[in-house]
Image (spheres, grey):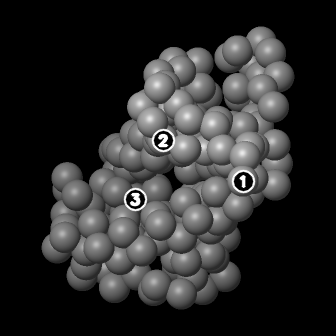
Amino acid sequence: MNKSFTQTGASHEPGEMDLVAIWLRFDLPRLISGAMAGVFAGIIMLIFAGILCKLGGLDPLLPVKVPATTLFGGEATALGFHAKYIVTGFIIHSMVTGLLGIVYGHFTQTNRTLPLLGAGFVWGTFSWIFIFNLFTKSFLAVRTLELPAGPAFFVHLAFGLSLVSISYFDEIVCGRVRS
Protein backbone atom coordinates (compact mmCIF):
# COMPACT_ATOMS: atom_id res chain seq x y z
CA MET A 1 0.00 0.00 0.00
CA ASN A 2 1.41 3.35 -1.02
CA LYS A 3 0.39 5.89 1.62
CA SER A 4 1.54 9.46 2.01
CA PHE A 5 1.49 11.27 5.31
CA THR A 6 0.63 14.91 5.86
CA GLN A 7 2.24 17.13 8.46
CA THR A 8 -0.56 16.21 10.87
CA GLY A 9 0.27 12.53 10.50
CA ALA A 10 -2.93 11.61 8.69
CA SER A 11 -2.49 9.09 5.93
CA HIS A 12 -3.92 9.55 2.46
CA GLU A 13 -4.19 7.15 -0.41
CA PRO A 14 -2.97 8.47 -3.76
CA GLY A 15 -5.76 10.46 -5.42
CA GLU A 16 -7.66 11.14 -2.18
CA MET A 17 -8.68 14.66 -1.27
CA ASP A 18 -8.45 16.20 2.17
CA LEU A 19 -12.01 17.56 2.39
CA VAL A 20 -11.42 19.21 5.75
CA ALA A 21 -8.56 21.25 4.32
CA ILE A 22 -10.69 22.19 1.31
CA TRP A 23 -13.68 23.16 3.47
CA LEU A 24 -11.54 25.28 5.80
CA ARG A 25 -10.33 27.40 2.90
CA PHE A 26 -11.99 30.84 2.62
CA ASP A 27 -12.78 31.66 -1.02
CA LEU A 28 -14.72 34.95 -1.20
CA PRO A 29 -15.38 34.86 -4.97
CA ARG A 30 -16.84 31.36 -4.58
CA LEU A 31 -19.09 32.54 -1.74
CA ILE A 32 -20.32 35.46 -3.85
CA SER A 33 -20.97 33.05 -6.72
CA GLY A 34 -22.84 30.79 -4.32
CA ALA A 35 -25.05 33.66 -3.17
CA MET A 36 -25.83 34.57 -6.78
CA ALA A 37 -26.58 30.94 -7.66
CA GLY A 38 -28.74 30.60 -4.55
CA VAL A 39 -30.88 33.62 -5.45
CA PHE A 40 -31.15 32.40 -9.06
CA ALA A 41 -32.13 28.91 -7.93
CA GLY A 42 -34.61 30.48 -5.51
CA ILE A 43 -36.27 32.31 -8.41
CA ILE A 44 -36.46 29.05 -10.38
CA MET A 45 -37.97 27.46 -7.27
CA LEU A 46 -40.63 30.19 -7.00
CA ILE A 47 -41.53 29.93 -10.69
CA PHE A 48 -41.89 26.13 -10.48
CA ALA A 49 -43.92 26.36 -7.27
CA GLY A 50 -46.13 29.05 -8.84
CA ILE A 51 -46.81 26.79 -11.82
CA LEU A 52 -47.73 23.92 -9.48
CA CYS A 53 -50.04 26.24 -7.52
CA LYS A 54 -51.73 27.41 -10.72
CA LEU A 55 -52.21 23.80 -11.86
CA GLY A 56 -53.67 22.99 -8.44
CA GLY A 57 -56.14 25.87 -8.59
CA LEU A 58 -54.31 28.03 -6.06
CA ASP A 59 -52.95 31.56 -6.25
CA PRO A 60 -49.75 31.35 -8.34
CA LEU A 61 -48.26 34.10 -6.16
CA LEU A 62 -48.69 31.96 -3.02
CA PRO A 63 -45.08 30.67 -3.02
CA VAL A 64 -43.65 34.20 -2.88
CA LYS A 65 -46.17 35.25 -0.22
CA VAL A 66 -45.50 32.33 2.16
CA PRO A 67 -42.20 33.74 3.53
CA ALA A 68 -44.01 36.99 4.33
CA THR A 69 -46.31 35.10 6.72
CA THR A 70 -43.40 34.98 9.16
CA LEU A 71 -43.82 38.74 9.62
CA PHE A 72 -47.45 39.44 8.71
CA GLY A 73 -49.23 36.20 9.62
CA GLY A 74 -51.87 34.51 7.52
CA GLU A 75 -53.06 37.79 5.99
CA ALA A 76 -49.95 37.75 3.76
CA THR A 77 -51.43 34.89 1.71
CA ALA A 78 -54.62 36.76 0.82
CA LEU A 79 -55.72 36.13 -2.76
CA GLY A 80 -54.63 38.79 -5.22
CA PHE A 81 -51.70 41.06 -5.87
CA HIS A 82 -50.53 42.69 -2.64
CA ALA A 83 -47.16 44.34 -3.27
CA LYS A 84 -46.21 44.60 0.41
CA TYR A 85 -46.48 40.84 0.93
CA ILE A 86 -44.94 39.92 -2.40
CA VAL A 87 -41.90 42.19 -1.99
CA THR A 88 -41.39 41.17 1.65
CA GLY A 89 -41.77 37.49 0.81
CA PHE A 90 -39.35 37.78 -2.10
CA ILE A 91 -36.73 39.53 0.05
CA ILE A 92 -36.99 36.93 2.82
CA HIS A 93 -36.95 34.07 0.30
CA SER A 94 -33.92 35.55 -1.51
CA MET A 95 -32.01 36.02 1.74
CA VAL A 96 -32.58 32.39 2.74
CA THR A 97 -31.79 30.94 -0.69
CA GLY A 98 -28.75 33.22 -1.02
CA LEU A 99 -27.45 31.97 2.33
CA LEU A 100 -28.07 28.36 1.28
CA GLY A 101 -26.22 29.11 -1.96
CA ILE A 102 -23.24 30.47 -0.01
CA VAL A 103 -23.03 27.27 2.02
CA TYR A 104 -23.45 25.17 -1.15
CA GLY A 105 -20.67 27.16 -2.85
CA HIS A 106 -18.37 26.72 0.12
CA PHE A 107 -18.74 22.94 0.12
CA THR A 108 -18.60 22.43 -3.65
CA GLN A 109 -15.22 23.49 -4.95
CA THR A 110 -15.75 22.32 -8.52
CA ASN A 111 -17.64 23.60 -11.53
CA ARG A 112 -18.04 20.21 -13.19
CA THR A 113 -21.72 19.60 -13.96
CA LEU A 114 -22.15 16.03 -12.74
CA PRO A 115 -20.72 16.56 -9.23
CA LEU A 116 -22.70 19.81 -8.93
CA LEU A 117 -25.92 18.02 -9.91
CA GLY A 118 -25.24 15.31 -7.34
CA ALA A 119 -24.56 17.86 -4.64
CA GLY A 120 -27.63 19.82 -5.77
CA PHE A 121 -29.82 16.74 -5.42
CA VAL A 122 -28.52 16.23 -1.89
CA TRP A 123 -28.88 19.95 -1.11
CA GLY A 124 -32.46 20.04 -2.41
CA THR A 125 -33.36 16.97 -0.37
CA PHE A 126 -31.66 18.46 2.69
CA SER A 127 -33.61 21.69 2.21
CA TRP A 128 -36.88 19.79 1.93
CA ILE A 129 -36.24 17.71 5.06
CA PHE A 130 -34.79 20.31 7.37
CA ILE A 131 -36.11 23.61 6.09
CA PHE A 132 -39.54 22.74 4.71
CA ASN A 133 -40.50 19.93 7.08
CA LEU A 134 -38.85 21.17 10.29
CA PHE A 135 -37.82 24.82 10.29
CA THR A 136 -40.76 26.43 8.49
CA LYS A 137 -43.23 24.41 10.57
CA SER A 138 -41.97 26.31 13.61
CA PHE A 139 -43.90 29.35 12.31
CA LEU A 140 -47.58 28.97 13.20
CA ALA A 141 -48.75 30.98 10.18
CA VAL A 142 -46.84 28.68 7.82
CA ARG A 143 -47.92 25.52 9.65
CA THR A 144 -51.62 26.49 9.42
CA LEU A 145 -51.30 26.75 5.61
CA GLU A 146 -50.81 22.96 5.55
CA LEU A 147 -48.56 23.10 2.51
CA PRO A 148 -48.33 19.66 0.85
CA ALA A 149 -45.01 17.92 1.38
CA GLY A 150 -45.08 15.88 -1.86
CA PRO A 151 -45.02 18.74 -4.36
CA ALA A 152 -42.72 20.67 -2.02
CA PHE A 153 -40.12 17.91 -2.42
CA PHE A 154 -39.98 18.50 -6.18
CA VAL A 155 -39.92 22.27 -5.68
CA HIS A 156 -36.89 21.88 -3.39
CA LEU A 157 -35.25 19.54 -5.89
CA ALA A 158 -35.70 22.22 -8.56
CA PHE A 159 -33.88 24.58 -6.19
CA GLY A 160 -31.06 22.13 -5.49
CA LEU A 161 -30.54 21.16 -9.12
CA SER A 162 -30.63 24.82 -10.21
CA LEU A 163 -27.63 25.45 -7.98
CA VAL A 164 -25.53 23.98 -10.80
CA SER A 165 -25.70 27.57 -12.11
CA ILE A 166 -22.88 28.32 -9.66
CA SER A 167 -20.42 27.34 -12.40
CA TYR A 168 -21.76 30.15 -14.60
CA PHE A 169 -21.70 32.73 -11.80
CA ASP A 170 -18.25 31.56 -10.66
CA GLU A 171 -16.81 32.19 -14.12
CA ILE A 172 -18.34 35.69 -14.12
CA VAL A 173 -17.11 36.59 -10.62
CA CYS A 174 -13.68 34.93 -10.83
CA GLY A 175 -12.98 35.53 -14.47
CA ARG A 176 -11.48 32.06 -14.73
CA VAL A 177 -12.66 28.52 -15.20
CA ARG A 178 -12.53 26.33 -12.11
CA SER A 179 -12.10 22.60 -12.69
* Label 1 CA crowd tier, 10 Å (few <14, some 14–19, many 20+): few
* Label 3 CA crowd tier, 10 Å (few <14, some 14–19, many 20+): many
Quarter location, residue 171: top right
Q: Dividing the image into 4 quarters, which one contains the C terminus?
A: top right
**Residue at x 19%, y 68% (from the top left corner):** 139
Q: Position of residue 114 (x, y in %)?
A: 81, 55
Amino acid at circle 1: Met
First of labels 3, 2 by sequence position: 2
Structural distance between the alpha carbons of marks 1 and 3? 58 Å
First of labels 1, 3 by sequence position: 1
Which residue is tagged 3?
65
**Residue at x 78%, y 26% (from the top left corner):** 178
First of labels 1, 2 by sequence position: 1
Question: Mark 1 or 2, which is nearer the eye?
Answer: 1
Q: Position of residue 112 (x, y in %)?
A: 81, 43
Which residue is tagged 2?
10
Above or below — where is 3 with respect to 7? Answer: below
Amino acid at circle 2: Ala
Which residue is tagged 1?
1
Q: Is residue 44 left or right of residue 84?
A: right
Q: Is residue 169 left or right of residue 21?
A: right
Q: Nearer the viewer, residue 51 or 12?
A: 12
**Residue at x 75%, y 19% (from the top left corner):** 172
